[in-house]
Image (tube, grey):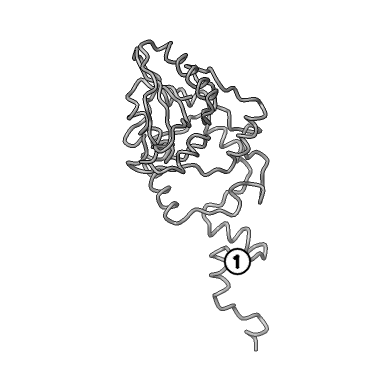
Amino acid sequence: METTTTTAEAGFVYGIRPRREREYRYVGITTKTVARRFQQHLKVARGGRKTPFYDWLRKQEADSVVAEELQSVWDLEDLGKAEIDWIAYLKRDGDRLLNVSGGGLGPIGLVWTAEQREAARIRSLGRPGISRFGEANPFFGRSHTAEQRQKWAETRKGTHTGPDNPNYGKFGDAHPGFGRSMTEESRQLLSETRTGAGNPNYGKKASEETRAKMSAVRRGRPMPTSKRSAHTRHHTNKGVEKADCRYCIDDSAKPSLPSESESES
């Protein structure tokens, strides 16, 4: 079943068949011209939609398939009924229609069972889909309104925190991002977008209450005034040497001072 949302009062029932055969393989309705609706079917088929009809249409040459007007209907409600009648009639006549429902307007027709929905969900897992970039993207050059973005923000607030986060409690190789790293180009681009006005905290200042809380949390905690002093406190004074510490590396490269016995000799 293919329907088009419209305010038109008239439409057509059409059938699609191989040019050299009389057997129809699909019946649909449209309030556009049959030729225009057929071109839309070809475009959807090229886009990769998975239905019995579109799977069949992809296997055909574009000029080897025709769409024909079966009936002209002057009432929108009667248009859906006419499609139902045509589908039933052609099936009784032996045509192997690829429609997945019995036709009609609105939700009339095929209703998936819970098992069918679960099977479709499993099949779609990991499917890469179709990515369209630049001018090929149908949303290219457009943007969502501030009202729509605010609406999404309110509906999604708190939905990805704690146990509601799909990656909650996943660590190591169990995490989807395990072993992945950003390229230098991506790092540079991310840095540029978050610099200056792009930083979410740009121009903001913590309130006195927040500053007091931060101070209370850090009270009593050693806070070195520089990286060099932190190295002296936590490495040199404790006899610790770390391979990723630049000051440990610099110190190891320096010539060691002679011991007291060596200096006396």
Q: Please name the residue that numbered disc 1 is placed on.
A: 243
- At horizontal 63% and vertical 62% (from top left) the residue drawn is 235
Q: Residue at x 31, y 35 (%)?
A: 141
- Callout 1: 10 Å neighbours few (<14), some, many (20+)? few
Q: Quadrant where the C terminus lies?
A: bottom right
Quadrant of the rendered structure where residue 195 is? top left
Tell me residue 150's x, y (percent): 44, 24
Q: Give the residue drawn at x 60%, y 46%.
A: 176
Residue beneath the point at 67% across and 62% down: 238
Kindly identify the amino acid type of the residue bearing the numbered disc 1.
Ala
| The image quarter in which residue 162 lies | top right
Secondary structure beneath label 1: loop
Total marks placed: 1
Q: Quadrant of residue 229?
A: bottom right
Q: Is residue 9 left or right of residue 101?
A: left
| Picture coordinates of residue 68, whole percent (x, y) | 37, 28
What percent of the width, then of the height, locates residue 192?
38, 48
Which residue is outermost to the bottom?
Answer: 265
The front one of 47 and 172 is 47
Q: Is residue 121 above or below residue 76?
A: below
Give whichever of 138, 13 is nearer the camera: 13
Residue 251 position (above or below residue 228): below
Where is residue 39 shown, x and y percent of the image?
35, 34
Nearer the observer, 43 or 152: 43
